Image (tube, helix red, strand yellow):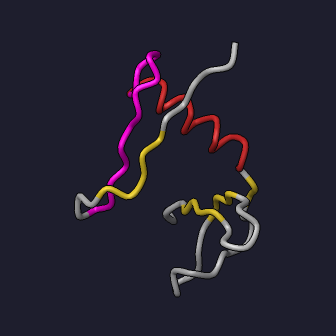
Amino acid sequence: MKKLHIAASPLTGTIFAGHVLKDGRTWGKGKQDLTSEALIAVAEHAIHFGGKTGKAIKVSDDYGKLIYTIKVSKER
């Protein structure tokens, strides 16, 4: 089974999911725009792990270096 890849376009910011070719950079057939779904999933993840108090979650790379802090508040 091919590994699923998800990434944001550096030109448009659109978040795509699909498979990449062997070069690891080129999208194969069938990539899908999942921008809304991905953003909702990240927001739900942040609420779950950051708590309803709005505590920020920290995102690190594979080496433990902090690269993002995400804080989400839910609209009523």
Residue at 46% x, 23% y: name it. 54
- List x then y, in percent, for residue 40: 64, 35
- List x then y, in percent, for residue 67: 38, 58
Residue 26 falls left or right of residue 56 = right
Residue at 68% x, 40% y: name it. 37
Quadrant of the frame with the C terminus: top right
Q: Residue furthest bottom?
A: 23
Classify residue 11 by image quadrant. Answer: bottom right
Q: Residue furthest left?
A: 63
Residue at 51% x, 80% y: name it. 24
- List x then y, in percent, for residue 38: 63, 44
Counting labels gives: 0
Judge whether 44 appears above or below 31 on screen: above
Judge whether 33 appears above or below 12 on screen: above
Judge whether 24 appears above or below 41 on screen: below
Q: Which residues make up the magenta segment?
A: 50-62
Q: Residue furthest top?
A: 76
Magenta span has 49? no
- List x then y, in percent, for residue 28: 67, 75
- Secondary structure mainly formed by the magenta segment: loop
Residue at 54% x, 63% y: name it. 5
